[in-house]
Amino acid sequence: MLELTQQEAEEMVFSNWIESTTDFDEEDITPRYYRTEEDLTAKAVCGGDDRIKVTTTTTMPYKAICKLYMKSPSGKKNYIGTGWLTHTNKLYTAGHCVYDRKEKGWMKSIIVVPGKSGKAEPYGRYYASAFTTTRGWKEKGIPRYDMGAIKIGSDVSHSDVLTPMLEDPVRGEICGYPADRDTGIFQYRMEDSLRKAGGQFKYMLDTYGGQSGSPLLKDRSVAVGIHNYGGCPNSASDLYQLFVNTVDQW
């Protein structure tokens, strides 16, 4: 099979309309990180664990960060992830949170919970109506293009969203829902230095399964990347103009 050019890899592909689904049982959820269970073990926590628990999710950027409950294409597995609102009805996440290359299909369903904090869900739950990802992820599984977006069926109950920017800050913060802390129902954050390599940000920020799709934050209102892999250094895909424009116009 021929390799994709950069232009082809950056192109976006779209799912069909998705039917609403029933709620998931929290105990049935397993971390979604697109690594094997062996690869998940502590490799994404780099040295000591320096993550800080977010205790209030009713302020920015935390109210724009969403817990995701995904059902696999076959409907046989449940996963968790993270996303972040860029519009009141659209959010960014990792490509593997919307398209499963192992099962070669779009997630059967996704529930989006903005600002979830323990049992509290201050802005309610929303159901995905459509997904998109890059050709680079869907066809080739290229980590740099492991990026996606979700459209939900109605606007969320607040208007505060993150602004995606094409910038290269030297420091950043990851915030999402790691499955190894408090059963994955609270946000955790950490700030540290960043470096760029091959279209990805690299960092020693502590993360874990369930944080795939988290924003790489420049500040409280701007995000510059989508977290998708562990490995110490952990990594996020850099945003690019076609991705941002396509989701804007979707």
Image (cartoon, rainbow, N blue to C red):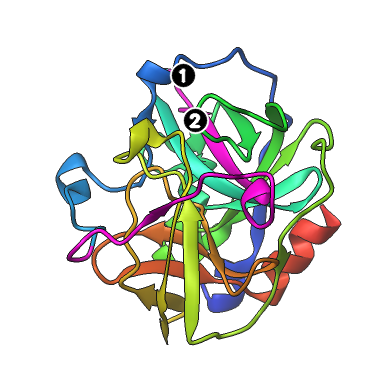
Q: Residues within 10 Å of mark 1 (few under 14, many from 20)?
A: few
Where's residue 132, x and y in %?
65, 48
Q: Is 58 included in the stretch rendered in magenta?
A: yes
Q: Quadrant of residue 180?
A: top left
Q: Residue at x 36, y 17 (%)?
A: 27
Mark whose residue sits in front, 1 or 2: 2
Where's residue 10, x and y in %?
60, 69
Q: Residue at x 28, y 72 (%)?
A: 233
Part of the protein shown in magenta: 46-75
Q: Quadrant of residue 106?
A: top right
Residue beneath disc 2: 118
Residue 75 is labelled as 1
Q: Amino acid at mark 2?
A: Gly
Residue 5 horizontal side relative to residue 160, left or right = left
Can the viewer see residue 149? no
Q: Residues within 10 Å of mark 2 (few under 14, many from 20)?
A: few
Residue 159 position (above or below residue 100):
below
